[in-house]
Image (spheres, rainbow, N blue to C red):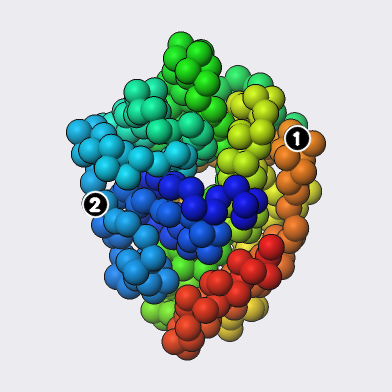
C-alpha cells in the first residue's frame, strides 16, 4: 500500500471533520502529496490544527459545489486520485436545511464526478456515501450491496441521489474513459476528537467535561460503532485495488460484524464506567417528528472476500480506546505523536 501511494497526488474533498484529518495524516505518512479541498474546520480547537496539517499538505478553502474553483484546483495540482468525503453529514441538520443538504451531498458529488470525467489527470476515485442509502425495514437480515436503495429523511435521500448519479456517470462516461470508481457505504465511525453535534460519543464526552446531565432520546436504539482506522484502511485498500483490476469497481459495505453491536444505553453506561461516574436521563422528545431508525445492519461479506478487509477490534475495545484518547487530549498530551503511533500500531 505504501508503494502505491508514495509520491501520488491525492485530492481529498471534505466539508470539515475529524475523519478527513485522520485520512490526510495517514496519506501524508505514506508519502503522498495531499490536496485538501474543504471548508474551514467548524470547531475550535480542531484536529486539523492539532495534527499540524497546515505544515504537511496543501489547503484550498472552497465549497464542493463551486465547480470553477474545483476545476482550477485540479488544473493546478493535477491529482491522480480522489477521495470524495465532502458532505453535510448530520441527519438532524438535514431537516433544518434540506436544500443545503441536497445541494452539498448530491450536487457536490455530481461536481466531483464531472471533474473525474473531464480531467485527464484523474484515474481513480473512492466516493464515500453512507449506510443509510438502503431501504431500511429494520429487519435482522443485514443489507447487501445489491439491495434496494431508498430514503426517508433529507440526508439519506441526498446520499441515495448521489449514488444514482455515480451509477449514471459510471455507465455513461467513466467505464469508456477507463476511469475507475468505487463507492463506500460506512456506518458512523468512532475515535477521538470527533466534536460534531448530535453524535453519541462526542455528546457523552461534552456532557462529562461540562458537568451536564446527558439526555438520551432513544436508549434502546441499536447503534453499531466502528473503529475509524478500520474504515479508513478499507478506503485505502480500495484505492490500490482499483489500480489492479476492474473487478473491484462498485459499492462496498464497511461495517462491524453484525454480532458486535450495542444499544445506546449500553454505550453510555460503558463510557461512564471508563471515564468516571456521571449521570444521564432518558427523556424521549414528545414533539420529535423526524424519522430515526431503531435498527440498521449491513453485510460486510463482500469487503472481506474481495479486499481481505475485516474488523480487528470489537466495540467494547474501540469504546475503551476512544475514551482513553479523549482523556489524553484533556491532559494536553502530544496529539500528533499519539495519532502517528496509533496509525503505526494499527498497521
Residue beneath the point at 52% across and 68% down: 192
State which quadrant residue 141 falls in: top right
Picture coordinates of residue 268, whole percent (x, y): 59, 66
Name above or below for residue 125 compared with residue 285. above
Query: Where 206 sits versus 105, above or below?
Result: below
Determine crowd level at label 2: few under 14, some 14-19, many 20+ residues with C-alpha closer than 10 A: few
Q: Report if residue 107 is visible in the image.
A: yes
Q: Which element is circle 1 on?
A: helix
118 or 139: nearer the viewer = 118
Q: Nearer the viewer, residue 268 or 69?
A: 69
Residue for badge 2: 61
Q: Is residue 85 above or below residue 342?
A: above
Per the image, the residue denoted by label 1 is 306
Residue drawn at 56 percent across, 72 percent down: 340
Question: Real-space Cα distance between discs 1 and 2?
Answer: 36 Å
Picture residue at 46% right of the left edge, 68% below the top: 193
Residue displayed at 48% across by 31% down: 123
Disc on the earlier residue, 1 or 2: 2
Give how far across and how far down residue 191 sits, in percent: 55, 64
Callout 1 crowding tier (Cα within 10 Å): few <14, some 14–19, many ≥20: few
In this view, 221 is above or below 133: below
Q: Position of residue 15 (x, y in %)?
A: 33, 49
- The residue furthest top is 172
Residue 182 appears left or right of 160 = right
The quadrant holding residue 20 is bottom left
Q: So how many labels did they put on this image?
A: 2
Q: Which x, y percent locates residue 237?
A: 64, 45
Amino acid at each position: 500500500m505504501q508503494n502505491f501511494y508514495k509520491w501520488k497526488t491525492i485530492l481529498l474533498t471534505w466539508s470539515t471533520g475529524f475523519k478527513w484529518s485522520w485520512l490526510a495524516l495517514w496519506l501524508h505518512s505514506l508519502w503522498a502529496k495531499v490536496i485538501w479541498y474543504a471548508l474551514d474546520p467548524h470547531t475550535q480547537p480542531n484536529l486539523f490544527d492539532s495534527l499540524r496539517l497546515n505544515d504537511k499538505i496543501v489547503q484550498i478553502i472552497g465549497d464542493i459545489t463551486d465547480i470553477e474553483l474545483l476545476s482550477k484546483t485540479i488544473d493546478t495540482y493535477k491529482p491522480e486520485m480522489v477521495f470524495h468525503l465532502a458532505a453535510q453529514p448530520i441527519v438532524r441538520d438535514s431537516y433544518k436545511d434540506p436544500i443545503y443538504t441536497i445541494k452539498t451531498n448530491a450536487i457536490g458529488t455530481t461536481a466531483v464526478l464531472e471533474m473525474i470525467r473531464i480531467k485527464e489527470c484523474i484515474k481513480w476515485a473512492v466516493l464515500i456515501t453512507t449506510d443509510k442509502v438502503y431501504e431500511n425495514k429494520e429487519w435482522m437480515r443485514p443489507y447487501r450491496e445489491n439491495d434496494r436503495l431508498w430514503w426517508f429523511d433529507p440526508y439519506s435521500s441526498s446520499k441515495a441521489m448521489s449514488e444514482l448519479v455515480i451509477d449514471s456517470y459510471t455507465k455513461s462516461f467513466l467505464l469508456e474513459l477507463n476511469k475507475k470508481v468505487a463507492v463506500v457505504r460506512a456506518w458512523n465511525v468512532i475515535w477521538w476528537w470527533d466534536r460534531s453535534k448530535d453524535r453519541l460519543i462526542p455528546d457523552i464526552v461534552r456532557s462529562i467535561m461540562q458537568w451536564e446531565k446527558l439526555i438520551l432520546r432513544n436508549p434502546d436504539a441499536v447503534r453499531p460503532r466502528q473503529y475509524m482506522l478500520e474504515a479508513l484502511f478499507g478506503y485505502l485498500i480500495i484505492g490500490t485495488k482499483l489500480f489492479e483490476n476492474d473487478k473491484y469497481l462498485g459499492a462496498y459495505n464497511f461495517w462491524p460484524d453484525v454480532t458486535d453491536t450495542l444499544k445506546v444505553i449500553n454505550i453510555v453506561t460503558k463510557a461512564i464506567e471508563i471515564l468516571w461516574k456521571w449521570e444521564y436521563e432518558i427523556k424521549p422528545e414528545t414533539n420529535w417528528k423526524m424519522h430515526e431508525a431503531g435498527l440498521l445492519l449491513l453485510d460486510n461479506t463482500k469487503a472481506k472476500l474481495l479486499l481481505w478487509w475485516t474488523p480487528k477490534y470489537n466495540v467494547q475495545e474501540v469504546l475503551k480506546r476512544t475514551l482513553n484518547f479523549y482523556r489524553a487530549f484533556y491532559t494536553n498530551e502530544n496529539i500528533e505523536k499519539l495519532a502517528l503511533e496509533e496509525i503505526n500500531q494499527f498497521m
